[in-house]
Image (tube, rainbow, N blue to C red):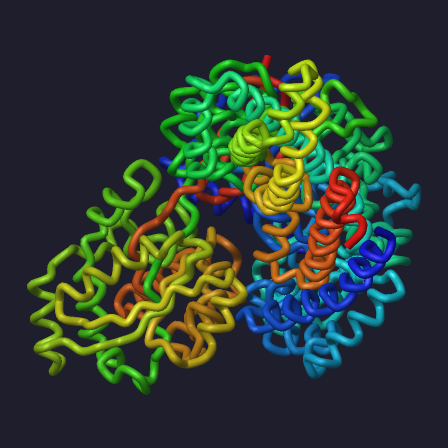
Amino acid sequence: MLKRQKTRGAAIAALVTAGLVLSGCAADDTPASSDAQLDIQYFGSVVTLDPALSGQGPSANIIALAYDPLIYMTPDGEYIPDLATDWGYTDDENTEFEFTLRDGVTFSSGAELDADAAVASMEYFLDSGGGTASQVGDIDSIEAVDEATVRITYTEPFPDAEWTLSQYIKFGSIIGPDGLADPEALSTEMDGTGQYVYNAAESVANASYVFDRNPDYWNADAQMYERVTVRAISDENAALSAIQTGQVDYTLGAPSTLDAAEDAGLEVLQVPFFNWAIHIADRTGELTPALEDPRVREAIAISIDRQAIVDAVSPDTAQPSSQLLNEGAVGFVPGLEFDYDPERAQQLLADAGYPDGFSMSILSTNSLDQNAIRAQAIVSYLEAIGIDVDLTADATGVSGFVEESQTGKYSATIFPMSGTTMGLLYPTLRSGPRNPSAVLDSEMESLFSSSRALAAEKSVPVYEQMSELAFANAWNIPIFTANDIHYIGPELAGVKVTNLNPIPIAVAPDPQYAWHPSA
Amino acid sequence: MVAVLARRVLMAIPILVIVSVVMFVLASIVPGDQARTILGENATPQAVAALREQLGLNLPLSQQYLNWAWGALRGDFGASIYSGQSVLTIVGARFPVTGSLMLLATILIAVLGGILGMLSALRGGWIGRVLDAASLVGLAVPSFAIAILLVSVFAVSVRIFPATGYVPFSDNPAGWLWALILPVIALSLGGVTLVAKQMRDSVLDALSRDYVRMMRANGIPERSIIFRHVLKNASIPSITIVGVGAVASLTSTVFVENVFVLPGLGTLATQSTLNHDLPVLLGLGVFFTMMVILINLVVDVMYGVLNPKVRIS
């Protein structure tokens, strides 16, 4: 029998309690569905309509309109049934995961959802090698146990199956067999079981995406709108104008437009998201031998006046941070903070044999940090304790930055991190721009691997140990957390963001979580 | 005239080849990798390498260019590495927006610029001084700054025009015009003042010529002198300026479309640059070049119509 762990998400949500829910909306204002229309802004350019290739982040808001995930993650970070009605690991090692499919669900092409369709879609996801395919664990096999049951077998313990099958990673956003028959067409057409059907005729790629209500959706109660339009608006001033004049009901906000949005009477939600940090790249001390000494890294960590940077760069939309995880995330340890102490920092440098400081190179990116303002603010504190920094701000986009970080020319990088649990965050710190040399701390690795086979509630203490160890090692030195900002127009209600689920999406299989017209 | 046109069209071929080669080389030396862009920062090096192979990014640059050019010759400009749509489809879907903007802006530049210039030359005085001041502002303030100002005043504060968006002409002609008024004003302000200044100077110059004095002495009505002779001669240099204005509005659309979130070629150019979407960028480069050649051709034809000497040479 399955050892059901459907309460995993609930357990996590319950473990992390106070101060999480940052939304001001009440729970009881859910109206019945109507003939209303919803217009939402999408920031950035849309990658593709193919769930397997669409990457992570806000593209979920487009994909989820037409593709139901197997498991839905609520704004509180809880996992609830969507296409899968029941699920769990069948062993104690987190290597075998089974789920049961909902009965009577059809794709927009008319085909019926069954285990074979789900397996084919998930295998397509793995084969396509999209941006999130590396995050779903090492999978040995996916098989249909019977008509309604699917089993995923992992080669190593993998505790985050629910997360990967939710709307964000899209491994569980099931594509219909007719869509899969022509994978190339999936980038411009959609074949899902979702609440809305993509209207290709009225959409313009990278400008506006139109979705009509799906008359065959399995839960009509959760469909709040007749039509949903997603408009790509990347200019923050244009986004503000659009929501101020009622052209859209929801937009992503920005620090520069926050005051104007509040003055205009828009509802503003904020939730910590990007945790900006210095990542020591030269872990073996090839370029900068000083960085191998933990006293030097601690000196760097305490040389920075985090509050002053926050006050200067983003006073209303950021807060100082000293840990890998944001406050409220699973594995965060209250009270673990670097205190600003430049004198002690200089003492530490002297103890380590660098009384006159040393020089190092740092790579940052202009794509997420315009004009490298954050990076420059951080670097100025290093220079104050005698560390001479050669700062390079890459201006060629995130992919250019990632490539450049791998060249071995830089002692450190300045780049944000994000993750709602240590289990989800840590893998992103093992290589890439946050650890280009991919040199790993053995103690950290053993803690991480021991967490993999544990049930959710049992992994929390291990995650906290990882937070403490990361704090002591200071290979990644957090500086401040910038909030994601959301503006909600007067016609819209039900938008909610929390530390455990910072990305709001419009649709939900349960009406209580769906965005809906305000009463 | 036909020979002139034929020569121009033939000259367009090497220009297109040079532009596409330059764009290809420039785009390929920009750091960042299409495969990495598509797969995201967490992609494994193996996945990136496999996709590079699949996209043909490992081929020599010259081979990549020839592959592209051979396709382009047959009308296949490739597909966006992002949306997967063919470049022709994307450009075709977005051209009506930019085309509408440019058409309306050029008409406004020519008509309003011409009228203001004439008025200033004939009535002189304060109109001339205002025009001088306005042309300084029109030239100094970039069109996107004017665009932001127009949005905040006429769309957000006083809600007369929509702040963002485009309405296709076929859906609703009035809505189409309404959505384009602010962007067109932002696009054409600089051009209007330039044309007006040029027009004023040319009209004043023409009025001081001997043939005007002769006609006046012969008792030909002033109205006829101005509209049948002066205006025609004075228009010739202004047409060059209108042409320059039309080309300039093509580049300005990049900014103005972003401010008004119009799904045109300008926003497409910005997005595909940020995305390293090479096929789209190349397609746009070729298209923009053809537009510039076409505008110049139209200017030449109008020159010929107005000035017989050009027709003979």
Residue at 66% across, 48% down:
B268
Residue at 13% across, 74% down:
A349
Q: Position of residue A269 (x, y in %)?
A: 44, 31
Query: Would residue A222 be visible to someone looking at this image?
Result: no
Side of A469 where A162 appears, left or right: right
A264 and A198: which one is in front? A264
Residue at 66% across, 60% down:
B277
B58 and A41: which one is in front? B58
Q: Position of residue B146 (x, y in %)?
A: 48, 31
Query: Would residue B171 be visible to someone looking at this image?
Result: yes
Q: Position of residue B255 (x, y in %)?
A: 55, 42
Which quadrant would residue B161 be assigned to in this image?
A: top right
B53 up-or-down from A187: above or below: below
Q: Position of residue A29 (x, y in %)?
A: 57, 17
Quarter of the image with the C terminus of chain A in it? top right
Which quadrant would residue B169 be assigned to in this image?
A: top right
B313 and B99: which one is in front? B313
